[in-house]
Image: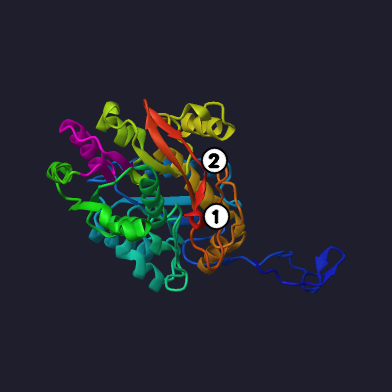
């Protein structure tokens, strides 16, 4: 943040001595959504509809900002967090985001959820020059500061994650015959393109590729098609509702392939338990957050702090749901970014601060994973570790894998 150079006389600036006025040590700068007393942040989330299991993220973020305000806010300013239900419907997201930007006049959007929904507002946010920060989607396009300087993701990108799965399949499954279930939108296609890149010359190992629409009632017929293809590997690119359905159906029809599940559906409570624990043993996914059901974190200091926070601010929340961990971690990052702005709460400065984190330790990220950004690097978290489902929880294995190690 730039500071004005001043000449001081006896502890007061020369200007103040001459005018007899009080000293202003730093000039305050504000855009819409920020005042001496308040910072206004906008958010959309699917509290209803096919992705409603993610609704707890918005509720947890609401609780997080309450806890920030209880501690005195951000540099003395209270945070007004406005969260609206878009039902995971892109047209609804467009309508609500226009309301947040043009009527509520928020300083920034924060952690809006979903690839198709964020895609619908991507150009609009950049045309309006309103920060579109730390999105709840890992699509690789959120990290393109040249084309979209007002949009930044948070979690590891889907493309890199899928490359890691593909390489693991080739290294660990003898004579792989791969079936892919994919949500038919930008989210699904991002994973699919990364998976093909990871397979490289072995892309012909994919023997069946089926899609579903988010409005479909079930994916039963797709699972039957995949089994009938003779596939011995199942790469599952689906949100929790369909991920649970597909893994349960595979077990019901006696299909037991090696299973790879995209990280966005790796929750024990909303995916693995509904699928049936017996049906998901050995499933592999990528992790970058500490899972609250993993006993190795039972005495972890960050996890203890989080559990205390949950008890106070989310007493009815499920402490086994990693979505609450996710919400806490991304909200912490937003809090630190706003703090760095000081009294320069302009949208441009908020983006500058978001793009200047250096190996920031964000609570509940896995050991060895930190947040780093720069004006040319809009991917805050760029590493994962693989984990395998065992019993009623995940078990980490192998090393932390960064984008460059793939």
Per the image, label 2 sits on a secondary structure element best described as helix
Q: First in sequence, mark 2 or 1: give its number.
A: 1
Per the image, label 1 sits on a secondary structure element best described as loop
Q: Specify how the rendered protein is coloured.
A: rainbow
Q: Give the percent coordinates (x, y) of residue 345.
A: 55, 63
Q: Give the range drawn in magenta.
A: 231-260
Q: Quarter of the image holding residue 323?
A: top left
Viewed as shown, does residue 137 lie left or right of 341?
A: left
Viewed as shown, does residue 353 lie left or right of 214?
A: right
- The image shows residue 72, relative to residue 277, as above or below, that is below
Q: Give the percent coordinates (x, y) of residue 285.
A: 38, 42
Asked if residue 321 shows in the view, the reply is no
Q: Which residue lies furthest to the front in this view?
A: 175
Residue located beneath label 1 in the image: 37
Residue located beneath label 2 in the image: 70
- Give the foreground label among 2 and 1: 2
- The image shows residue 52, relative to residue 204, as above or below, that is above
Q: Let me know if residue 246 is in the magenta part.
A: yes
Q: Which of 359 and 1 is in front in this view?
A: 359
Asked if residue 46 shows in the view, the reply is yes
Q: Let me know if residue 321 is in the magenta part.
A: no
State how far apart marks 2 and 1 are (Cα).
14 Å
The residue that appears at 46% across and 36% down in the rendered structure is 396
**Location of the N terminus (image quadrant):** bottom right
């Amino acid at each position: 943040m730039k500071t004005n150079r001043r000449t001081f006389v006896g502890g007061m600036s020369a200007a103040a001595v001459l005018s007899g006025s009080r000293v202003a040590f730093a000039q305050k700068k504000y855009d819409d959504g920020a005042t001496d007393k308040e910072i206004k942040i906008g958010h959309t989330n699917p509290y209803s509809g096919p992705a409603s299991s993610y609704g707890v993220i918005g509720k947890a973020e609401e609780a997080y900002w309450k806890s920030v305000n209880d501690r005195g806010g951000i540099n003395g300013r209270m945070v007004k967090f406005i969260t609206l239900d878009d039902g995971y419907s892109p047209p609804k997201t467009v309508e609500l985001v226009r309301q947040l930007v043009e009527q509520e006049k928020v300083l920034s959007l924060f952690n809006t959820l979903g690839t198709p929904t964020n895609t619908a507002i991507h150009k609009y946010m950049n045309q309006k020059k309103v920060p579109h920060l730390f999105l709840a989607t890992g699509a690789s396009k959120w990290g393109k500061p040249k084309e979209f300087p007002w949009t930044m993701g948070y979690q590891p990108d889907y493309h890199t994650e899928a490359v890691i799965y593909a390489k693991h399949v080739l290294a660990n499954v003898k004579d792989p015959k791969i079936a892919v279930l994919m949500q038919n939108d930008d989210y699904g296609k991002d994973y699919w393109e990364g998976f093909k890149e990871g397979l490289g010359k072995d892309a012909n190992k994919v023997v069946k590729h089926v899609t579903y629409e988010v409005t479909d009632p079930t994916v039963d017929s797709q699972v039957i098609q995949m089994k009938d293809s003779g596939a011995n590997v199942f790469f599952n690119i689906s949100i929790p509702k369909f991920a649970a359905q597909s893994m349960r159906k595979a077990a019901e029809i006696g299909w037991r392939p090696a299973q790879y599940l995209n990280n966005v559906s790796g929750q024990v409570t909303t995916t693995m338990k509904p699928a049936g624990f017996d049906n998901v043993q050995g499933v592999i996914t990528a992790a970058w957050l500490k899972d609250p059901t993993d006993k190795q974190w039972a005495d972890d200091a960050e996890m203890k702090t989080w559990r205390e926070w949950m008890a106070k601010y989310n007493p009815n929340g499920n402490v086994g749901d990693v979505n609450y961990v996710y919400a806490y971690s991304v909200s912490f990052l937003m809090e630190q970014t706003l703090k760095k702005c000081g009294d320069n709460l302009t949208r441009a400065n908020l983006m500058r601060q978001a793009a200047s984190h250096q190996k920031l330790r964000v609570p509940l990220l896995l050991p060895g994973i930190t947040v780093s950004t720069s004006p040319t690097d809009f991917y805050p978290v760029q590493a994962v570790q693989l984990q395998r489902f065992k019993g009623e929880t995940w078990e980490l294995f192998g090393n932390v894998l960064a984008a460059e190690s793939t």
